[in-house]
Image (spheres, helix red, strand yellow):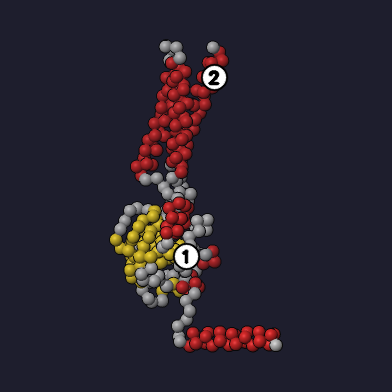
Amino acid sequence: MRRTLVVAAWCLAAMLGQAAAQESASDGTPEITAETRGWSLRETLIPDEEYLLANPEFDILVVRVLEADDRDGTNADPPAVTLEIEEVLRGPSRQGTVSARWYGPIWHEDLAPEGGTTEAWQSRPLSGPTVGDRLIVFGGSGPEGVFTVQAHAVYRLTEANRQAVFEHAARTHSVPVFIALWVGMGASALGALTLFVVSFFAEEPAGRAERLRLGVVACAVAALVLYVIYESGIPPYAAIRIDLLLLWPALGLAVVLGAISLVLILRAKRGS
């Protein structure tokens, strides 16, 4: 008897579910899924899974959606969106409204052999966000100055998501800091070279040559410390490092002179 009731309940649930599905399909409004939408709003920002956090080339903004086309767009022709910037979590300070372009995610199979994207990717449906939503978005300036939002990295604004950005987003040094570090490294290398040369002509008073060579060692250490700080602000995605053509020779010179000076100091102490 119990088994008969269970089977009957299961059949009734199946029929009700089928009827609901037919009713949903008959109203002419298809369900919007991640595949038809082209992107999906993420609820939780997990730092280990969001690789754009490690790329400071992408700005991170807190925005409110003011306008969004309700037409059916595609990856090649996305709907127009207007965002109100509420807060800049990473990137240059800005405020007011900005025109935005939702940029659909591109996977390996979406790349065309001859370059660019496939026709399938270009024709893939892409809808805009919902007006009134408050979001955390990753993006940057695209063609014609339009802010391009990476649609696969759009998160709902919550305090937890906002704090995750503050704690895990990689940042670059500002231009004045970069200039100061360059000047410091250059001065350290030049100082090491100058003190090293002068130390060979220092005879009086006693111990002056040793003090000069200690200065060479100090300059070498300073150059190394400044270089480490400098590298901490370089994006991991920087592929071409022309700056290293100047930095490494200068840094190498300072380190070599510092090592030689340290050896000369130790030898002098043993001789005395």
Amino acid marked by disc 1 = Glu
Q: Position of residue 228 (x, y in %)?
A: 47, 39
Residue assigned mark 2 = 266
| Front residue of 86 and 35 | 86
Q: Is residue 88 visible?
A: yes
Residue assigned mark 1 = 43
Figure quadrant of the C terminus: top right
| Front residue of 11 and 261 | 11
Q: Residue at x 55, y 13 (%)?
A: 271
Q: Position of residue 26 (x, y in %)?
A: 48, 88
Residue 114, disc: none
The local secondary structure at tag 2 comes to helix
Q: Residue at x 36, y 69 (%)?
A: 132
Q: Residues within 10 Å of mark 1 (few under 14, many from 20)?
A: few
Question: Is residue 75 placed above or below 237 in the rendered structure?
Answer: below
Question: Is residue 37 placed above or below 89 in the rendered structure?
Answer: below
* Disc 2 from disc 1: Cα separation: 62 Å
Q: Position of residue 43 (x, y in %)?
A: 47, 65
Q: Residue at x 45, y 59 (%)?
A: 161
Q: Position of residue 225 (x, y in %)?
A: 46, 35
Residue 246 left/right relative to 12: left
Q: Are marks 2 and 1 in contact (CB under 8 Å)?
A: no
Check the image and name the residue furthest to the front: 1
